């Protein structure tokens, strides 16, 4: 559910990991280097992300390659839809107000 995804992504380090994985699939060593964090810390966050279904991994030789899973982000996007609509209507009203009151 989107709320679980939001709870998992509320942690800034996990968002940074997702930002890195958005650019390309990566192994733990690449993420450690990109984030300048310890391997145990990155692995801990990857486990939380994996348990929530936000990332998945596949074995390649001796390492695991992580990638983002679209499902949780699609659920989050669907949950945000009504809020986007609300903001859009509010901004449209503001634009009309500003156009009519120079």
Image (tube, rainbow, N blue to C red):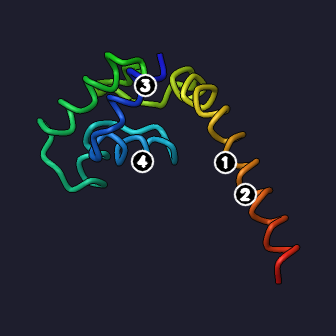
Element carrying mark 2:
helix
Q: Please give the residue where the numbered disc 1 appears in the rendered image.
A: 87
Query: Along the polypeptide, which appears first: circle 2 or circle 4?
Result: 4
Cα separation, mark 2 vs mark 1, equals 6 Å
Q: Please give the residue where the numbered disc 4 appears in the rendered image.
A: 20
Image-based side of 98 in relation to 43, left or right: right
Q: Nearer the viewer, mark 4 or mark 1?
A: 1
Element carrying mark 4:
helix
Cα separation, mark 3 vs mark 2, equals 32 Å
Cα separation, mark 3 vs mark 1, equals 27 Å
Q: Residue at x 23, y 33 (%)?
A: 45
Q: Nearer the viewer, mark 2 or mark 4?
A: 2
Q: Position of residue 39 (x, y in %)?
A: 15, 40
Compared with residue 64, is residue 30 higher up or lower down, i.e. above or below?
Answer: below
Q: Nearer the viewer, mark 3 or mark 4?
A: 3
Tag shown at residue 54 = 3
- Sort mark 1 into few (<14), some (14-19) or many (20+) by Cα contacts within 10 Å: few
Cα separation, mark 3 vs mark 4, equals 13 Å
Cα separation, mark 4 vs mark 1, equals 29 Å
Q: Please give the residue where the numbered disc 2 appears in the rendered image.
A: 91
Q: Observer-nearest residue: 76 or 46? A: 76
Quarter of the rendering containing residue 4: top left
Q: Position of residue 97 (x, y in %)?
A: 80, 67
Image-based side of 58 in relation to 34, left or right: right
Query: Along the polypeptide, which appears first: circle 4 or circle 1?
Result: 4
Q: Position of residue 12 (x, y in %)?
A: 29, 47
Q: Position of residue 65 (x, y in %)?
A: 38, 29
């Amino acid at each position: 559910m989107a709320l679980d995804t939001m709870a998992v992504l509320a942690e800034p380090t996990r968002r940074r990991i997702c930002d890195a994985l958005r650019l390309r699939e990566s192994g733990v060593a690449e993420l450690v280097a990109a984030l300048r964090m310890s391997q145990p810390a990155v692995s801990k966050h990857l486990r939380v992300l994996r348990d929530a279904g936000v990332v998945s991994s596949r074995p390649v030789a001796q390492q695991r390659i992580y990638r983002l899973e679209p499902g949780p982000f699609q659920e989050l996007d669907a949950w945000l839809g009504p809020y986007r609509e609300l903001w859009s209507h509010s901004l449209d009203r503001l634009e009309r107000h500003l156009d009519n009151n120079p």
